[in-house]
Amino acid sequence: MTRVRVAASPRPYEVLIQGGLLACSGEQLREWLGGDTPSLFVVTVPAVRRRWGEKLARSLSGRGFRAQWLEMPDGEPHKTLATVARLAERLARLHADRDAVIVAFGGGVVGDVAGLVASLYMRGVNVVQVPTTVLGQVDASIGGKTAVNLPAGKNLVGTFHQPLAVLVDPEVLSSLSERQFRAGLYESLKCGVIGRPELFHRLERADWRALRRDPVMLEWVIAESIKLKAEVVSADERETGLRRVLNFGHTIGHALEAESRYRRFLHGEAIAWGMIAATEIAKEMGVCADATRRRIGDAVLRAGALPRVVARGKDILGRLATDKKTREGLVHFVLPRELGKVEIVNHVPPSLVLAAVDGLRKLGTRE
Ligand SMILES: NC(=O)c1ccc[n+]([C@@H]2O[C@H](COP(=O)([O-])OP(=O)(O)OC[C@H]3O[C@@H](n4cnc5c(N)ncnc54)[C@H](O)[C@@H]3O)[C@@H](O)[C@H]2O)c1
Ligand SMILES: [Zn+2]
């Protein structure tokens, strides 16, 4: 079992990573909660409950926990204040009190919604994150950011609310679609570029399809990604500076997602394109060597087919002006210097952004 500590306020917490952990979740919660037996409220979506609910439920009841299950509808369109309000209402009807513990059991959407509910209900109750997608495990469940979307934009309403603990069982990833699985892994590749060169090396050589059937390697990849995120978050809990390195690939990636109205790409796929574009820009600006550019580009494209980019450079440039990462009119880019090292640059000439995005359109891969 890998244990990763996240230094955060009001207290540090642990991320546990191990195949089969779901079946021991009751035991782990006992360890964290001691003799207390608060009521647990598991927030999930029907698909995750159907496939994995029984395992979690059995382990919790085996350790004397009483768990109530709250389902929310599946998918990003339900990451809204209305869903938060409905869940809070249900908690109240079930007599959840201040000692209640919410268990967020699902992908990043469940993690974000349940995390936000936990931070608001009775001015804040504890949440344990049990992420079930690659993206949830390596990214969304760590760091305490919660949010929902508004019609005006994604993640516009949210809080920082650190979990009590995070339980990561890579075995649950076996039921993810191949596309969802791979999309999440681009975030791991991102972690490699930012600060874990060995992770990058292994991912660039691996067959990503085979990874799902290689529990040892998969657990290592997930654990290394989590370590990177935990280190960055621990150094900069409120995203004032250092944490921005996690946005490698996200400046153009977010713009591509928005430009295609969140329909064309899964988040990780847009980030995959964004990493290629940022690396092109880095090479053009002399921030990284051509060999580094080639390796990052090849690693992304080798991993599997991506939906093609059809957006035009000038439309993406327009999007960047309204991005959350724009500060005082300057768009900041996270650019790779070498594998495992990035830097933040806020004077990227628009002509380079144009060229990089138009370059993506020529790269293919899947319609
Ligand atoms: N808080 C953060 O720091 C942070 C970071 C990154 C992303 N996010 C958020 O995460 C969300 C995306 O997360 P996501 O990609 O996990 O999407 P998601 O939660 O919508 O999950 C994707 C799909 O996979 C299904 N699923 C989940 N686990 C499964 C399993 N084990 N087997 C089979 N199917 C399963 C879900 O039901 C869903 O249909 C976005 O809303 C994003 O904003 C938050
Ligand atoms: Zn991301």
Image (spheres, rainbow, N blue to C red):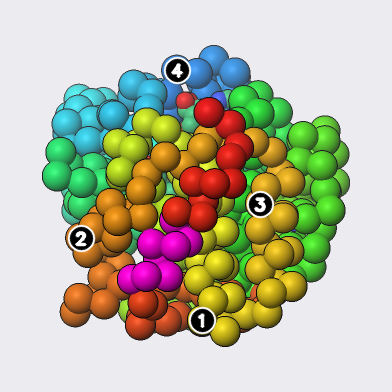
Estimate how packed mark 4 is, as few (under 14), some (14 to 19) or many (20 or more) residues with alpha carbons within 10 Å.
Answer: some
Mark 3 touches mark 1? (CB < 8 Å): no
Kindly identify the amino acid type of the residue bearing the numbered disc 4.
Answer: Pro
| Sequence order check, earlier mark of 4 and 1 | 4
* Left or right: 225, with 356 as reference point: right
Estimate how packed mark 1 is, as few (under 14), some (14 to 19) or many (20 or more) residues with alpha carbons within 10 Å.
Answer: some
Kindly identify the amino acid type of the residue bearing the numbered disc 1.
Answer: Met
Q: CA distance from mark 2 to mark 1?
A: 24 Å
In this rendering, the answer to whether 114 lies above or below 314 is: above
Prevalent SS, magenta region: helix
In this rendering, the answer to whether 197 lies above or below 126 is: below
The residue sitting at 70% across, 28% down in the picture is 174
Please tell me whether mark 2 sits on a helix, a strand or a loop: loop
Please tell me whether mark 4 sits on a helix, a strand or a loop: helix
In this rendering, the answer to whether 133 lies above or below 360 is: above
Closest to the observer, 293 or 250: 293
Magenta range is 350-357
Residue position for label 1: 285
Residue position for label 4: 46
Residue 300 badge: 3
| Sequence order check, earlier mark of 4 and 2 | 4
